[in-house]
Amino acid sequence: MRPIFVSLAILFFLAQTPSLAQQTISRVEPPNWWVGMELNTIEILVYGREIGALVPSLESYPGVQLTKVKTVPNNNYLFLTLHIAPETTPGNLKFVFGGENGQRIPYTYPLLAREDGRKNSIGFNSSDAIYLITPDRFANGNPGNDNVEGLTDKADRSDKGGRHGGDLEGIIKNLDYIDDMGFTAIWMNPVLENAMPKNSYHGYATTDYYKVDPRYGSNAMFKELCNEAKDRGMKVIMDMIVNHCGLEHWWMKDLPSEDWINQWPEYTQTNHRKTIILDPYASQLDTREFFDGWFVPSMPDLNQRNASMASYLIQNSIWWIEYAGIDGIRMDTYPYPDMYFMADWTKAIMDEYPNFNIVGEEWVTRPTIVSYWQKGKENSNGYTSHLKSLMDFPLQHALVTSLVSEKTWSSSWVHVYEVLGQDYLYPDPKNLVIFPDNHDMSRIFTQLNEDVDLLKMALVYTATMRGIPQFYYGTEVLMKNRESDDHGLIRSDFPGGWEGDKINAFSGEGLTPAEKDMQSFFKKLLNWRKDTPTLHTGKLMQFSPKNDTEIYAFFRYDDDRKIMVIFNKEATEVQHTLDQYQEILGTTLSGKDVLSGTTFEQVNSLRIPARTAMIIEVN
């Protein structure tokens, strides 16, 4: 990493050296704004050769003022602050950048009208079931964009770490499949440009915050995807990263200032110590290493304490919501940026879109740490968060542990029972996103040792538990990573997404009986969930698993309905008495198992087949 810092020093010297070359404007970001926004004072980044030597002026426009012009050490940047009054009408702002030698560069900046309903967009919530997709690995709708001139990371399906050609058009063409399966929302791994030399298919090394990667499509196609999803009653969640960018981001070749990113005398990686945030004994060095250390050498750590960087990132997120009409954000590595910036970032978005939702990634298995970030939490250090949702990694870990563990002196179900019992730490546990796996860990089928019965239990648990369920693409057809936990293998191609695939999960052609059965099971489960509001907003009551059995049960209920979810991990059928549940069931049970269709009439015990989950709608 040392050569990076040497080159930056040279660039700063050159940037301050007068040039006789004609000044130009290469980039203006954000490329437009809207009238009638809560965020009506914005800072526009203007980039171009020696543009900082010019003086900008704004032609008179009712309601709009150029209130500040900021120069930085690099003369190739200007930052313009605009105030846009509430009554301002849409139109084009006309700037002129003038110099002492008579240079005049005109620039037109669009102010657009907002689309109807943007402000009141309803974000993802507990009525939804989210389908997580890695776009490069789902479906190749347009082979013509697999390789793009100027981008060196070429498509090669034989390379598990390379690009395979999946794109937005492939997702659009298969929206009906996703809808038919019972999903109501799509979360895609990042789709913005990653112009990195290799292994950039994952999307987490952004090189242009205002441009969809052309190998996925275009900004217009991303907007089309959002609209097509809405036409089916589905939502789109955009994966964002404000902690870091890609080393090949355009500004890394010509930084505005040294403090635009977090720099060290030599490469320093984050220590990943999540407890530092509340640790009363933490050293300043450890704290700085956590927040300012880089994830990997190819992903520079952004400095959100730089006021212009902070404005840039906030405006960029709001721009994508307003432009494309997304319904939510999944924020990558939520605790790693400056935490006070993250509070400002989240608040700005929620002020603009009160019904929106954002889920933060805090990958740690302790609820005491995850809960720190949720809105409404009273923290000992006074930190106030505005984040509605978090990924429930503690419950995911507990669920897998319960399913793969053997009974000892106590039931293996005690892991999920006790983690769920810590929900008192969260201000709003119903707004947590729960999941059996995601793109960064082994597939759930692999985690469960390719045991179909355990997988069905995991799916039932996730679909019926409190929170917002999320499932990774391919789980429905038993996708696995038996060979290794390599991320490229975990994110394998969805069968049928490429022309000529011998197996097609979209049509069912070539699937094994076990894969077809799982797909059918998944579809039935999620479509039932979609039409069961008790699972969306109902209360939860769980019962302690008895030490001498592998039975565990919980209830979802409201004033109109009760649903009993019960699991049997025993290798044999169990005749299970219902005395333990009298406070919610009464003395007998009448109802129907959603999955098997079996009915019960005033029974006081249940015959639960071996290694099975039952979902009983109680009469």
Image (cartoon, rainbow, N blue to C red):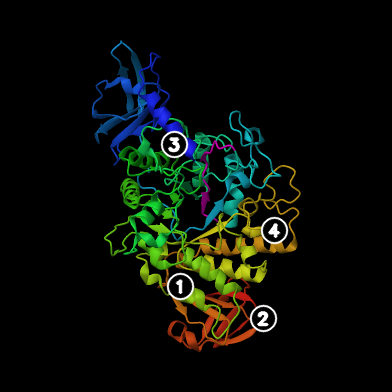
Callout 3 amino acid: Phe
Instruction: Please give the label number shown on residue 571.
Output: 2
Callout 3–callout 4 Cβ contact below 8 Å: no
Q: Which mark is residue 5?
A: 3
Q: Secondary structure at mark 1?
A: helix
Magenta residues, dominant SS class: loop
Mark nearer the N terminus (3 vs 1): 3
Where residue 116 sits: x, y (%)? 37, 40
Query: What residue would you read off at disc 4?
Result: 483
Task: Tell us which disc is closer to us: 3 or 4.
Answer: 3
Type of amino acid under label 2: Ala
Examine the rendering and report whether any part of residue 475 can be seen.
yes
Residue 98's x, y, as percent? 30, 16
Q: Earlier in the sequence, mark 3 or mark 4?
A: 3
> Residue 230 appears at what percent x and percent y?
49, 46
The answer for how far apart the CA atoms under marks 3 and 2 are is 61 Å
For residue 399, above or below residue 325: below
Q: Residues within 10 Å of mark 3 (few under 14, many from 20)?
A: some
Of residue 147 and residue 233, the one placed in the foreground of this image is: 147
Q: Earlier in the sequence, mark 4 or mark 1?
A: 1
Over which residues does the magenta segment extend?
183-197
Magenta stretch: includes residue 539: no
